[in-house]
Image: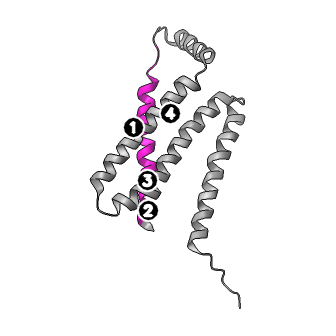
Amino acid sequence: MVKSISIPDNKIKLTLHVIAWIIIIIIPLYLNYAFGGGDQHRLYQFYVHTISAVFIFYVGYLWLVPRFFLQNKKTTYILILIGLIILTYLLTSFINENILSNPIQDAKFLEAYKKVTGENTTPSFKVFGLFNHILASILISGFAMGLGVME
């Protein structure tokens, strides 16, 4: 007769979080070196956004869901979550524009953009970045809420 192996729930949860962290760290490194030519600047920008997403997930999963959502304080949950999403967007934008900006690469990009389009304006990446951040944050918050409710 074969004995079944039972793994405690907390070890499964910890293992899943470790696997997720490994994926979060390894995949960008692979993609950057496979397709980005080893551009460290873009990798750092990606990790800033990734850390922002992880922060939103864990704040929601460990604090917002048990403290507000499961206690039937859904309005408070939503307001804090909206504030958190806006705060992380502003913080990642500040870091990318003021700390991780690369004026040489940006100038090369604008020159290439001008050649292709004939326009002397900057494309509205901020609007796209805000839209992307909001959608990704809502998705991540949904995962956090789902995991928090399942426990």
Element assignment for label 4: helix
Q: Is the magenta stretch mostly helix, strand or loop?
A: helix
- Residue type at tag 4: Thr
Whole-number angstrom distance, CA of label 4 to CA of label 1: 10 Å
Labelled pair 3, 2 in contact (Cβ < 8 Å): yes
> According to the image, label 1 marks what residue?
86
Residue 150 position, x and y percent, is 44, 67
Element assignment for label 3: helix
Whole-number angstrom distance, CA of label 4 to CA of label 3: 18 Å
132 versus 14 height, above or below: above
> According to the image, label 3 marks what residue?
60
- Residue type at tag 3: Gly
- Residue type at tag 1: Ile
136 within the magenta span? yes
Q: Residue at x 45, y 38 (%)?
A: 88
Residue 92 is marked as: 4
* Quarter of the image that includes the N terminus: bottom right
Mark 2 and mark 4 lie on one chain; the one further toward the N terminus is 4
Residue 99 position, x and y percent, is 57, 25
Q: Give the range drawn in magenta.
A: 122-149
